[in-house]
Image (spheres, rainbow, N blue to C red):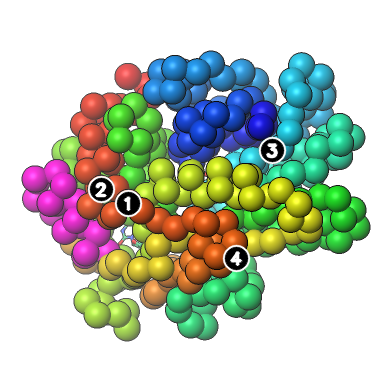
Amino acid sequence: MNVLLTGGAGYIGTHVAVELLESGHGVVVVDNLSNSRAEAVRRVERITGRSVACYIGDCADRALLERVFAEHRIDAAVHCAGLKAVGESTERPLLYYRNNLDALLTLCETMSAHGVRSLVFSSSATVYGDPERVPIPEDAPLSATNPYGATKLFAERVLADLAAAAPDWRIIALRYFNPVGAHPSGLIGEDPNGVPNNLFPYIAQVAAGRREKVLVYGDDYDTPDGTGVRDYLHVVDLARGHVAALERLGDAYGMRAYNLGSGHGVSVLEAIAAFERASGRPIPRQVVARRPGDIAVCYADPSAAHRDLGWKTTLTLDEACADTWRWQSANPNGFAG
Ligand code: NAD
Ligand code: WQD
């Protein structure tokens, strides 16, 4: 398959590109580099020994997408492009709604105009809001607790309506839990701008001596050690989930959503301990107040993805920590070199 991969220069997109290329598919990237660097795509080429056509521009730019479809035979799209910082989305909601929804709508319109009806969409466990129970199955109630989450919820709605109106579409929304880790080559990984919002890149920067200590957001949750529990999965496993989804789209008409998670909950303190083991370094931490909007526990019921896509996680948290540490140590300034 020849796959249009939006957001292909980003953290998840680069890993998806590697797994697609290594499975024998072709990849055409569209990315506006608003949160990434072109060097990341060159690293994908280095890992795989394959070349990747890369268009630097916005998915909401219809003329650009028209050019991509004119210059390549596209069989399917994987739509990873989007803004993803929860805090920023609360401060700049219009930016998030405009960017994330315009990109999706323009992509779907252009696909439709060119007769391409197969789409895998980067959704998120954020669509479950504050879950009533864990593990979370796909039919759990959906809600949004911030504008970023609302963009994912609305996007899923758009896709469901599209599939209902035009039954020749085949759409899979993949609801990611907490992707962590890096490619084992150490050539690609997460490269956040400024202070990381998420736990793993923050821990990695503390281990590397770039930051003093991890701030643990609350130890008074109703969890075994009082800290927040999440479902961390290796980004390479996550990326393989996209290949599985694309390859199983086949004649699966309509729109379906699948959880991509390990099914296991890990606390903040357990995550720090795993990273200490992998890096061989002590990781100073300090417990501070809860982060507003955080939930206590979130982990997936990933059985539907196993049943229908033949996918499950195979890599451990220790492997994710070792791979993050390799990436962080070899690239202390990320892709900036
Ligand atoms: P990322 O920021 O590293 O990658 C997103 C990429 O999309 C970036 O390269 C950015 O430059 C590009 N982009 C953003 N808006 C664009 C636009 N309008 N046109 C073209 N390119 C655009 O983030 P990521 O972690 O790789 O996330 C990829 C997708 O997965 C996002 O949709 C995100 O919401 C979703 N997701 C991520 C996580 C996570 O924890 N990383 C969890 C759940 C869902
Ligand atoms: C994990 C745990 C924090 C940072 C977010 C988005 C979600 C999804 C993934 C895109 C929590 C604790 C964190 C720190 C800490 N993204 N923590 N100190 O909040 O589960 O999910 O990213 O869709 O939508 O909300 O991930 O990595 O921020 O936090 O103690 O410096 O680590 O309280 O328990 P989260 P996270």
Q: Residue at x 74, y 44 (%)?
A: 118
**Residue 276 included in the magenta stretch of the image:** yes
| Residue 151 horizontal side relative to residue 84, left or right | right
Ligand 2 is within 8 Å of the C-beta of the residue at disc 4: no
Q: Residue 265: percent from the left, percent from the top? A: 34, 69
* Residue contact between numbered discs 2 and 1, judged by CB atoms under 8 Å: yes
Is residue 102 in sight in this rendering? no
Which residue in the structure is indicated by mark 3? 77
Q: What's the residue type where badge 2 is placed?
A: Glu
Name the quadrant containing residue 71. top right
Judged by its main secondary structure, the magenta piece is helix
Q: Nearer the viewer, mark 4 or mark 1?
A: 1
Where is mark 1, residue-wise? 315
Contact (Cβ within 8 Å) of mark 2 with mark 3: no
User: In front here: 250 or 209?
Assistant: 250
Boundaries of the magenta span: 268-285
Q: Is residue 312 magenta?
A: no
- For disc 2, the neighbor class at 10 Å (few under 14, some 14 to 19, many from 20) is some
Is residue 207 toward the left or the right of residue 38 in the image? Answer: left
